[in-house]
Image (cartoon, grey):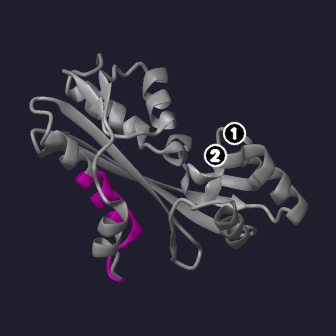
Amino acid sequence: MPLLLASGSPTRRAMLANAGVPVTAVELPDVDEYAVRDASGGFDVTTDEVAATLAYCKAMAVSLQRPETLVLAADQMLETADGCRLDKPLDREDARAQLIRLRGTTHRLVSAAVLMRDGAVVWEGIDAASLTMRDFSDVFLETYLDTVGDDVTGTVGGYRLEGPGVQLFSRVEGDVFTVLGLPLLPLLEALRTLDVIDE
């Protein structure tokens, strides 16, 4: 069964490739993420639910255009210790402000994924990890921003755990795949059930 990845994340694609999952195509979903977040981000809606809604909308946008194709879409959201949600930083200044806000605190990183075929959900999964940033110095912060350059705007929170961003942390609790952007182990189980990969 062909598997199409509805995500432009090179990290997600690498995770699937490293796990031996055959992705036949990649397509970016035409979804206004900010509009979806605004519409589903009321006080009574959890961060997990917003992430799941975004993953669903991305999967639907691509699935309706690709009949008989299994579509995988995902989304990731960051929830601060005081319950606020952060988006990807817009630029270096925004990244600096986010990292200063997260410094010395513990935040949640939520990853949601949806498998869809012909507009129908085949599987959905969600997981969260807890990450504690150390109380790093302002000098370290500037060195970090210099090191990662424009990549700092590529991920929510302004860091990649698989790169220099790991130095920002003193503790990570949860599945590392969730931090990287997919609830990978439950996803692999679903793909085995669907005969996309061998049992």
Q: Which residue shows up at 56% across the image and 42% down it?
A: 176
* Cβ atoms under marks 1 and 2 closer than 8 Å: yes
Indicate left or right for 140 with 67 as reference: right
Answer yes or no: is residue 57 visible.
yes
Q: Which residue shows up at 29% across the image and 45% down it?
A: 29
Q: Position of residue 108 (x, y in %)?
A: 54, 63
Up-down: is 49 above or below 169?
A: below
Q: From the image, which quarter does the C terminus lie in?
A: top left
Q: Position of residue 172 (x, y in %)?
A: 65, 52
Residue furthest to the top in view is 198
- Residue 139 is drawn in which quadrant? bottom right
Residue 45 inside the magenta-drawn segment: yes
Q: Position of residue 8 (x, y in %)?
A: 42, 39
Q: Which residues are magenta?
A: 43-57
- Residue 33 is drawn in which quadrant? bottom left
Q: Position of residue 92 (x, y in %)?
A: 69, 59
The amino acid marked with disc number 1 is: Gly
- Residue 27 is drawn in which quadrant? top left
Q: Which mark is residue 163?
A: 1
Sooner in the amino-acid sequence: mark 1 or mark 2: 2
Q: Secondary structure at mark 1?
A: loop
Answer yes or no: is residue 137 visible.
no
The amino acid marked with disc number 2 is: Asp
Indicate left or right for 141 with 33 as reference: right
Camera-side residue of 181 and 199: 181
Alpha carbon separation for disc pair 1 and 2: 10 Å
Indicate left or right for 178 with 191 as reference: right
Q: Which residue shows up at 22% across the image and 22% down it?
A: 2
Q: Which mark is residue 151?
A: 2
Up-down: is 47 above or below 156?
A: below
